């Protein structure tokens, strides 16, 4: 089991290390980050019932000395909550524009919206799906990434049916953290509790000609977007931020992700 896990970690670290090296992050920085996560997880998730987690126990669990545990705990956490907040706000607004009939025309497609004034406006859209976020700030972000276009008559038009940061490296890194963490957490859950495994599948072939990839990409974008919009409609009707009348108990975070991948096999480009 240990050898299999080590091999799996080596595999998943390769694309991550490529990103780190491309962005000038040396091993020493990565080492401190890894130590920090080891200490945090050991402290938060592996305590003994009814007892405060001690540095000695964290040291035993992580293999770090007590002195190193203390040093790592004193390191500042590189947390960019702002990137996650921007991503969530903008994505919710775009999704609401796509699915909410209040912001559609007679054909059921997202209509051009005035930024303010009478009737349903972009400001109303933001208020419905992004809480108290300033409508101007959300609009500027969506225009910046090409998801929304400003029209000459002052209205704004939805130019993309999903929000994907294209220019902000900080926001892209935020997605790297959140999306990969969700996938690994799902796989970990299925390993630890197979009796209650959740859906996690992929389809992959390893002898495809390069000429078929453009069509596969288009299929992924078109069909994947349609599936995600279907899930989005279902989830939004049950999310109490979007639909306060949904009711229910507890507070859970859940979702569905779809991604495309490709690479050369054994260094062969075809």
Image (tube, rainbow, N blue to C red):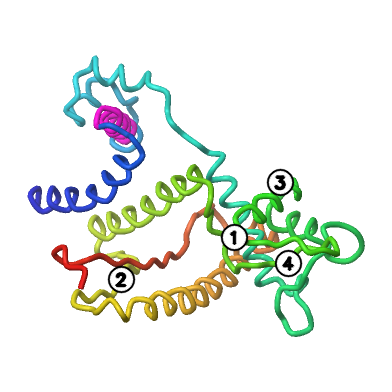
Residues drawn in magenta:
27-42
Q: Is residue 257 magenta?
A: no
Secondary-structure class at tag 3: helix
Comparing marks 2 and 1, which lies closer to the viewer? 2
Counting from the top left corner in percent of width and height, residue 17 is at 26, 44
* Label pair 3/2, CB-CB below 8 angstroms: no
Rendering quarter of residue 230: bottom right
Q: Which class describes the residues within 10 Å of circle 4: few (<14), some (14-19), or many (20+)? A: some
Q: Residue at x 27, y 51 (%)?
A: 15
Which secondary structure type mostly characterizes the magenta part of the structure? helix
Q: Residue furthest bottom?
A: 107
Q: Residue at x 20, y 30 (%)?
A: 62
Q: CA distance from mark 4 to mark 1?
A: 36 Å
* Label pair 1/3, CB-CB below 8 angstroms: no
Residue 48 in sight: no
Comparing marks 1 and 3, which lies closer to the viewer? 3
Asked if 203 appears above or below 162 in the picture, the reply is below
Q: CA distance from mark 2 to mark 1?
A: 29 Å
Q: Viewer-proximal residue, 179 or 52? A: 179
């Amino acid at each position: 089991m240990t050898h299999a896990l080590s091999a799996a970690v080596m595999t998943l670290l390769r694309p991550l290390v490529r990103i780190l090296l491309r962005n000038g992050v040396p091993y020493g920085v990565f080492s401190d980050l890894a130590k920090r996560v080891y200490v945090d997880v050991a402290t938060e998730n592996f305590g003994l019932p009814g007892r405060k987690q001690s540095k000695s126990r964290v040291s035993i669990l992580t293999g770090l000395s007590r002195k190193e545990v203390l040093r790592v705990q004193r390191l500042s956490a590189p947390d960019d909550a702002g990137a996650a907040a921007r991503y969530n706000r903008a994505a919710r607004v775009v999704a609401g524009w796509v699915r909410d009939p209040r912001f559609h025309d007679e054909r059921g497609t997202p209509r051009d919206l005035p930024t303010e004034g009478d009737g349903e406006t972009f400001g109303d859209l933001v208020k419905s799906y992004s809480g108290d976020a300033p409508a101007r700030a959300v609009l500027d972000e969506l225009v910046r990434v090409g998801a929304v276009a400003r029209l000459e008559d002052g209205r704004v038009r939805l130019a993309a049916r999903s929000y994907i940061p294209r220019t902000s490296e900080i926001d892209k890194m935020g997605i790297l953290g959140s999306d990969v963490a969700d996938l690994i957490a799902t796989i970990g859950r299925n390993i630890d509790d197979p009796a209650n495994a959740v859906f996690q599948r992929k389809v992959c072939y390893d002898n495809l000609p390069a000429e078929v990839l453009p069509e596969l990409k288009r299929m992924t974008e078109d069909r994947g977007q349609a599936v995600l919009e279907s899930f989005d409609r279902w989830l939004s009707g049950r999310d109490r931020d979007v639909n306060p009348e949904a009711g229910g108990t507890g507070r859970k975070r859940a979702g569905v992700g779809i991604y495309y991948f490709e690479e050369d096999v054994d260094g062969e480009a075809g």
